[in-house]
Image (cartoon, grey):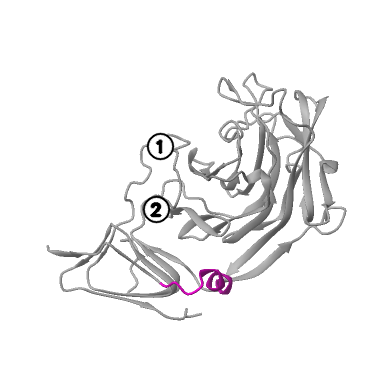
Amino acid sequence: MKKALFLLIIALSLGVTELQAQNWSIFREYEFNSSPIDTNIWVNYYPTGHYWWCNVNYWYFISRCHGTPITELATYWNDYAQYFNNGTNEGVKLVADESYHKFENCVYYNYKSGMIFSKEYFQYGKFEIKRKVPIGQGLHPAFWLWGGGGEIDVLEFMNEWSAEMKKVSFNYHNINDGFSDGTTYLNTINYSNDYHIYSIEWSANHIKWYVDNVLRWMVNSNAEGFPGGQMRIIANLAIQGTIGSHYYGPNTSTPFPSEFDIEYIKVYHSICPSYVLCDNDNLTTYSGYDIDLAVPNDVDYNGVVEDLWNHDDLHDLTCPKTVTTNLTVNAEHCITLNAGFSVELGAEFDANIINCSK
């Protein structure tokens, strides 16, 4: 059957920042402008205790209690999450410092550190943090969502890969089946020099990762291990240890104490939905904020991609979209037709930039 192929992008350049602001409404706003940290909202360590479970192999938080190497060398404590005000910025600082101690009946640790872990669960929305990361080998600042059998890393800086803190990694994990995927974005700036904004937009349809409001990576829901379920917000300053047989932990040049400064964390709800359309989407009309058709499994935007988890299926086209009869898409921001998009001869495809239907 003959097909009319489209390889083009339709976009509206009408002040993207303003339009993005219109698409989201604040649901939770945590500005950390007082001391102490509100314990009605946050706990300062994993809910299982000051360390990740001592007897559970979870992702790369591997237990030393049963003879396998541990990759986090710090436990988490209330007084290591502290209010700060430097005259220009204020918020919560997560402090990591040397402190040799034995925790309960597990192992000896060389470090203590800070964490905030939300008591509330969330599913879908925009999750945003403004923060300044520390620099030093073995320091591992992260902002992530966890729960419901999955994990989404809004950002991680792992100093074994980021000696100058120029490379930020984005990942997601499905704990139930052990699948993980991720990528990195390499910039020319050192993220430890100033505050930057990192966020994800997470829906049942896709996840988009942003750095300073610029899209850097996207995964659609057809991707293997796509996370769902309710999750809690975590920000922590981990101390990296080993991964496998390789040591990535602190050395004599690592500064202690080190601080991971957070000015705010915000959670938004969508006013106008966004869509990634594949062949399994059967409606004839879609109206949203932005619409992508035939997005590959995961897509790099404006950066250098490195396959952290060595999966061979990265960037495979798992989301073709063939219009066989009629399809109308209306978007307020942009409509993107990717290389897997096609319209069969005799079918009709109508794309319009109009106000979102609430």
Q: Main secondary structure of the magenta part?
A: helix
- The answer to whether 2 is drawn above or below residue 351 in the figure is above
Task: Look at the image and tell me whether residue 19 can be seen.
Answer: yes
Instruction: Return the residue nearer the eye: 37 or 166.
Output: 166
Residue closest to the far right:
35
* Quarter containing the N terminus: bottom left
In the image, residue 20 lies in the stretch drawn in magenta = yes
Q: Which three-letter amino acid code belongs to the residue tagged 1? A: His
Residue closest to the far left:
1
The residue at which mark 2 appears reads as 222
Q: Residues within 10 Å of mark 2 (few under 14, many from 20)?
A: some
- Dot 2 falls on a residue whose secondary structure is loop
In the image, residue 137 lies in the stretch drawn in magenta = no
Residue 202 percent coordinates (x, y): 53, 58
Q: Residues within 10 Å of mark 1 (few under 14, many from 20)?
A: few
Residue 277 percent coordinates (x, y): 36, 63
Left or right: 331 in relation to 154: left
Q: Which three-letter amino acid code belongs to the residue tagged 2? A: Asn
Which residues fall within the magenta stretch? 12-23
Residues at marks 1 and 2, CA–CA distance in whole angstroms: 16 Å
The residue that appears at 28% across and 57% down in the rendered structure is 340
The residue at which mark 1 appears reads as 311
The residue that appears at 56% across and 33% down in the rendered structure is 161
The residue that appears at 22% across and 73% down in the rendered structure is 325
- The answer to whether 173 is drawn above or below residue 212 in the figure is above
